[in-house]
Amino acid sequence: MTTSGLTTEDLEFLGRPLHGFLTVAAGTQPPQPRPVWFEATADGAVQLFTEPDALKVRRLSRDPRASLVVAAPVGERERWVSVAGRTTVETDGAHDLAARLAARYWDLDDPTRADDLAAILATDQIRIVLHPEAVHRYTY
């Protein structure tokens, strides 16, 4: 099924601590998906954080198209959601997003993970916001 926006069911699925695989347009280079933490927003966008000098940021500055695929883990019924669209790079809110996502993906009572988060928060971060133009989904 294809739509231009995320459904309530999609948002519920994307609210789980699952890895997304982000692919950005890379010109003549073949696509190279990377696993990322992400957050689906109430208004139907998808956001993630990264360092400002990351390769994906440089590629997105040349071509803002990207896609994110999220799949259910092994042991669950097959399900995936794919979001494709244009991105914007935002300089605000990245540290807050990183803290929310770290709490979702890690046990921050673990001192090692708390230190990992502190290291992330000590560096410059930006938000990449993916604005869905096409959403594909599959459930079996």
Image (tube, rainbow, N blue to C red):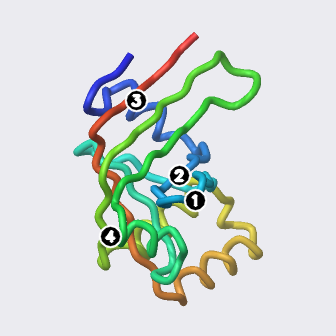
> Circle 3 sits on which residue?
10
Query: Tag 4, which secondary structure?
Result: strand
Image quarter for residue 136? top left
Callout in the foreground (1, 4):
1
- The residue at 58%/45% (across/down) is 17
Residue beneath disc 4 = 89
Q: CA distance from mark 3 to mark 1?
A: 30 Å
Q: Which residue is mark 2?
A: 22
Numbered label attached to residue 74:
none
Q: What quarter of the picture does the C terminus occupy?
A: top right
Assess disc 1: are there few (<14), some (14-19) or many (≥20) residues with their C-alpha within 10 Å of its C-alpha: few
Q: Give SS at disc 3.
A: helix
Closer to the camera, 119 or 23? 23
Q: Residue 114 vs residue 62: left or right? A: right
Q: Residue at x 22, y 45 (%)?
A: 43
The extreme front residue here reads 28
Q: Earlier in the sequence, mark 1 or mark 4?
A: 1
Badge 1 marks a residue whose secondary structure is loop
Q: Name the kind of residue labelled 4 in the image.
A: Val
Callout 4: few (<14), some (14-19), or many (20+) C-alpha neighbours within 10 Å?
some
Q: Where is residue 118 drawn, in percent x and y?
A: 60, 83
Number of the front mark, 3 or 1? 1
Of the pair 120 and 135, the residue shown nearer to us? 135
Q: Are marks 1 and 2 in contact (CB under 8 Å)?
A: no
The spot of residue 61 in percent (x, y) is 36, 72
- The residue that mark 1 highlights is 29
Q: Is residue 80 above or below residue 119?
A: above
In the orientation shown, which residue stands out farthest toward the top? 140
